[in-house]
Amino acid sequence: MGGCAVPSNQGDLVKVAIDLDAQLGNMNEAWLQQEILDEVL
């Protein structure tokens, strides 16, 4: 279990997309922070 993102991933492309007025869908289901797996399960 776990994510596939590198530790340095901080969501920079989401910020760029927002600045470019991109329409982002389903972001309400995103985990926008680090989570401790045991607590999530």
Image (tube, rainbow, N blue to C red):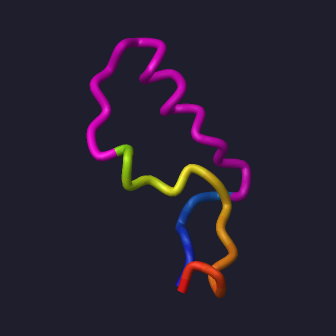
Q: Is the magenta stretch mostly helix, strand or loop?
A: loop
Q: Which residue is drawn at 54% across and 69% down?
A: 3
- Is 25 placed left or right of 5 in the picture? left
Q: Residue at x 43, y 23 (%)?
A: 17
- Is 32 placed left or right of 6 in the picture? left
Residue 41: quadrant of the picture? bottom right
Q: Is residue 19 magenta?
A: yes
Extent of the magenta region: 7-26
**Whole-percent x and y of residue 2?**
56, 77
- Is 19 placed left or right of 36 in the picture? left
Q: Which residue is drawn at 64% across and 82% down?
A: 39
**Whole-percent x and y of residue 34?**
67, 61
Considering every residue shown, the one lying at the far right of the view is 8
The total of numbered circles placed on residues is: 0
| Above-or-below relation of 26 to 6 | above
**Whole-percent x and y of residue 23?**
28, 25
Q: Is residue 21 magenta?
A: yes
